[in-house]
């Protein structure tokens, strides 16, 4: 394929690429163009095809195909694959889950492993539930334990001084089961802004707890060391405490751990207790997530506002995306041998979607409509069906993942499957900037907004589709641009019909429960989980958060995150021209800060 093909990149995409993605020499000077980056990645990943007996000419064909998908913004893999494929590190996974047992040796072994992962460019997730509670007996010394939250602070401090792959700060997910005796301390851990700055935190709640919280009742807390009951708590009081802290600060999130394990295809190999930092991939111990996303905005054809999904093009991108991600697993240089072992055993991948909001606009479908929810479910079902077929076809060529026997796939009647999972909905914070589309399955955050990202840079972003509509209607001009930039909204703009205003409703203008409905419709068909922020306006009440949590649980989501706009003094996305002056310039990674693509940054910018 001719290298005359150049990616069509926005100024913000160019800034992001030059700041962190493109290779540099020892003096810090750029030695690579965006086209060169895509070619480097395509060549590295396609080289794996040769290991399966593919002819040299066909290897080059796959290289050209992978290059074409990326250079045209139709598909992009997660950040470590873009930065490290064909480079010295060679670590291509986004995140890893590292186990922690109830001993000082295990805790600090986990800390060392986390440092290795962060150094290689990955994030980490941990379940701290096995650590004995504060005040518990330490037999070897006769003293008392300090509890899991105190050890989380140590992990946070170490993360603060290690940059992922030398290019970004580390990111962690901290999980604690709701039946741990220290659960209240954990819930409070991030209520004060700046605390545990490098952590997202989530409470792992059970179905039994949620039933007790809804109806009013008690539940038992258990000492993780002995497994014995150490008393009862009022479920509704604990639940309301979670709600209040999430309303106040965006943390903690909730993981519906029973649903996670019910739907885990490899549950016969053990239970899952933690996720990656953004929550979209529940993982076994030492397992990693290898992610990529298809840009739906590139799969719409036809007239503007009257478009339709090009299902044939989408099918091709899904099937080629599955092959790309399976090749990533083989090409990867894992930071720890345990990670290589389980990656080879399960070959878990996560192909997802981004640009959903633009696709809806191009089709003339309001994000908060019943039609949008139905189409989103149809798209997720199509993604699942086609990716499963692609994985099964790959297994015919390369063999099933070693844990296939006894998996849910075998029990459902599949004869073969290459990958334990194929689908995930990631937040796609920075790769969506490169692709020039909206993040994941989020609605438009605002028509014009400020994104704080990348070592202090501030990016002002405006939705091109609205500008196109305004120009076609003859109302675009300097005054209109300033009015939109000042509020981020078009609801008070003259010259637009009610239907057009609804089409461009933003995340904070969409009814809260429509966010949940969208997530639930998509989660129904996703193997892993969904990263989606339920955005609430600043004036929302704690009761709104409570309703979101209950609805998400009843809708069989695997987790849920809320963010009330302005509840943090510093946040990733800010609306209005004065946001540039009112917000501190911050460093944050739009891809790892869970849900930050929609305005929440649990991993506090500093």
Image: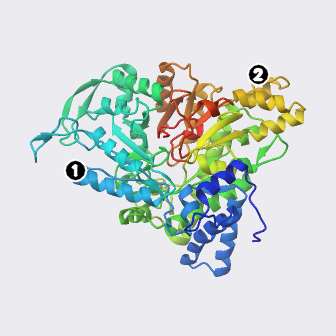
Residue corresponding to mark 2: 492
- Is residue 561 or residue 86 the one in the foreground? 86
Q: Position of residue 488 (x, y in %)?
A: 70, 30
Against 248, is 311 above or below?
below
- Is residue 294 or residue 578 the one in the foreground? 578
**Dot 1 alpha-carbon crowd within 10 angstroms: few under 14, some 14 to 19, many 20 or more:** few
Q: Position of residue 345 (x, y in %)?
A: 41, 64
User: Furthest residue to the right?
Assistant: 474
Residue corresponding to mark 1: 104
Whether pointer 1 and pointer 2 mark residues with C-beta atoms closer than 8 Å, the reply is no
- Residue drawn at x 57%, y 39% is 585
Against 83, is 1 above or below?
below
Against 375, is 113 above or below?
below
Residue 261 seen in this snapshot: no
Q: Quadrant of residue 372?
A: top right
Asked whether, in this view, residue 30 is left or right of residue 274, the answer is: right
Query: Which of pointers 1 and 2 lies earlier in the amino acid sequence?
Result: 1
Against 302, is 372 above or below?
above
Q: Position of residue 593 (x, y in %)?
A: 51, 43
Asked whether, in this view, residue 371 is left or right of residue 119, the answer is: right
Q: Position of residue 324 (x, y in %)?
A: 59, 64
**Dot 2 alpha-carbon crowd within 10 angstroms: few under 14, some 14 to 19, many 20 or more:** few
- Residue drawn at x 43%, y 43% is 198
User: How many angstroms separate mark 1 from mark 2 (CA)?
Assistant: 59 Å
- How many tags in the picture? 2
User: Furthest residue to the front?
Assistant: 27
Q: Quadrant of residue 476?
A: top right
SS class, disc 1:
helix
What is the basis of the colouring in this image?
rainbow
SS class, disc 2:
loop
- Residue drawn at x 40%, y 27% is 242
Residue 450 seen in this snapshot: yes
């Amino acid at each position: 394929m001719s290298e005359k093909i150049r990616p069509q990149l926005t100024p913000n995409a160019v800034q992001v690429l030059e700041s962190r993605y493109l290779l540099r020499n020892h003096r810090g000077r750029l030695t690579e163009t965006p086209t060169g980056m895509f070619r480097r990645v395509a060549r590295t990943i396609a080289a794996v095809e040769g290991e399966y007996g593919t002819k040299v000419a066909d290897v080059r064909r796959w290289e050209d195909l992978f290059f074409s998908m990326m250079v045209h913004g139709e598909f992009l893999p997660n950040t470590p694959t873009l930065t490290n494929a064909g480079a010295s590190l060679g670590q291509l996974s986004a995140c890893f889950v590292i186990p922690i047992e109830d001993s000082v040796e295990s805790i600090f072994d986990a800390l060392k492993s986390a440092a290795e992962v962060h150094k290689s460019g990955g994030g980490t997730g941990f379940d701290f539930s096995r650590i004995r509670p504060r005040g518990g007996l330490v037999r070897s010394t006769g003293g008392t334990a300090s509890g899991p939250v105190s050890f989380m602070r140590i992990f946070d401090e170490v993360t603060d001084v290690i940059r992922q792959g030398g290019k970004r700060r580390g990111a962690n997910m901290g999980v604690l089961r709701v039946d741990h005796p220290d659960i209240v301390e954990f819930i409070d851990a991030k209520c004060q802004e700046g605390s545990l700055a490098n952590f997202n935190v989530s409470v792992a709640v059970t179905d039994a707890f949620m039933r007790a919280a809804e109806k009013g009742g008690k539940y038992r807390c258990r000492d993780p060391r002995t497994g014995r009951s150490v008393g009862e708590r009022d479920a509704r009081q604990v639940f309301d405490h979670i709600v209040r802290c999430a309303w106040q600060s965006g943390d903690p999130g909730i993981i519906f751990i029973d649903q996670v394990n019910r739907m885990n295809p490899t549950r016969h190999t053990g239970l899952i207790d933690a996720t990656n930092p953004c929550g979209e991939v529940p993982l076994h111990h030492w397992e990693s997530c290898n992610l990529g996303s298809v840009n739906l905005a590139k799969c719409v054809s036809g007239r503007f506002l009257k478009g339709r999904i090009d299902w044939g093009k989408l099918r091709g991108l899904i099937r080629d995306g599955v092959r790309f991600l399976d090749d990533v697993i083989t090409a990867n240089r894992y930071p720890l041998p345990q990670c290589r072992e389980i990656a080879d055993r399960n070959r878990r991948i996560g192909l997802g979607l981004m640009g959903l909001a633009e696709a809806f606009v191009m089709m003339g479908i309001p994000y908060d409509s019943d039609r949008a929810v139905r189409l989103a479910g149809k798209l997720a079902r199509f993604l699942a069906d086609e990716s499963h077929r692609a994985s099964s076809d790959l297994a015919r060529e390369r063999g099933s993942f070693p844990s296939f026997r006894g998996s849910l796939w075998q029990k459902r009647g599949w004869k073969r499957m290459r990958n334990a999972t194929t689908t995930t909905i990631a937040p796609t914070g920075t790769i969506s900037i490169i692709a020039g589309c909206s993040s994941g399955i989020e609605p438009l955050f605002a028509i014009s907004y400020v994104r704080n990202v990348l070592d202090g840079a501030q990016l002002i972003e405006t939705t091109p589709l609205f500008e196109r509509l305004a120009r076609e209607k003859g109302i675009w001009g300097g005054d209109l641009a300033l009015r939109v930039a000042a509020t981020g909204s078009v609801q008070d703009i003259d010259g637009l019909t009610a239907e057009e205003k609804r089409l461009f409703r933003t995340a904070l203008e969409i009814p809260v429960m429509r966010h949940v409905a969208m997530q639930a419709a998509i989660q129904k068909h996703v193997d892993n989980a969904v990263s989606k922020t339920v955005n609430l306006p600043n004036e929302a009440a704690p009761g709104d958060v409570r309703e979101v949590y209950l609805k998400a649980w009843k809708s069989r989501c695997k987790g849920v995150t809320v963010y009330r706009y302005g509840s943090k003094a510093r946040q990733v996305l800010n609306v209005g021209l004065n946001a540039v002056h009112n917000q501190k310039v911050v460093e944050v990674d739009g891809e790892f800060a869970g849900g930050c693509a929609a305005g929440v940054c649990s991993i506090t910018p500093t």
